[in-house]
Amino acid sequence: LFTYSRALRRGDGDFDGVVQVAVRTGFFQRPGLDGEARGATAIGLFDAEGRVLARTGLSAPRLDLRIPQAVQARLAAGAEAGTLRLDPEFDSVARIASFRRLPVWGVVVMASVPEAEALAPWRRAVSWSVGLIGAAALVMLLLAGLAIRLVRREGEARAALASANAGLRDAA
């Protein structure tokens, strides 16, 4: 088991209980978290030196991997948490990741999803918006064409009427 425990204390410092989390190491080897997260979400735990302690979908032979360089740079700069795009280091796809340093335990927790999966709702919304704007622009273009046609017809009718009036005046 992979375990963490923490004592709880009241405001006056008296003992108030213990919180313990215990997870089987096999939990971190599953490709995704079926009920806890959707799709290809990956959750990892790294020690203070950036070594992988556990990560979903990571087999035992790959446990020598280290925390991604971009996250290491942010942590070295003093960031306690953040979200960033990661190039493929653990997997073969770019990922959007969020991380948080837990200084009490000396670990970094990171959760990530494939970039395509993270951006899919945004891309659908943009496609829908572009389609809607395109349809509105087409309707406005058709209305403008109709208005121009009506103005031309009115101009032609005025010219024909003026010509007929001039002919009548000349005949009178």
Image: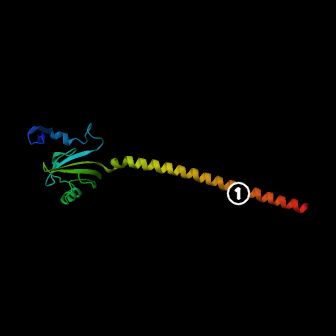
In this rendered view, identify the residue nearer to me: 112 or 106: 106
Q: Locate the C terminus by quadrant.
A: bottom right
Residue 165 occupies quadrant: bottom right
Q: Name the residue under label 1.
A: 152
Residue at left offset 56%, top offset 51%: 138
Residue furthest to the front: 12
Residue at left offset 29%, top offset 51%: 96
Q: Is mark 1 on a helix, strand or loop?
A: helix
Residue 5 occupies quadrant: top left
Taking 169 as reference, is 62 left or right? Answer: left
Residue furthest to the left: 14
Residue 101 seen in this snapshot: yes
Q: Horizontal and vertical percent for residue 149?
A: 68, 55
Q: Horizontal and vertical percent for residue 82?
A: 25, 53
> Type of residue at label 1?
Arg
Q: Horizontal and vertical percent for residue 142?
A: 61, 52
Residue 91 seen in this snapshot: no
Q: Horizontal and vertical percent for residue 40?
A: 28, 44
Q: Residues within 10 Å of mark 1 (few under 14, many from 20)?
A: few
Residue at left offset 54%, top offset 52%: 137
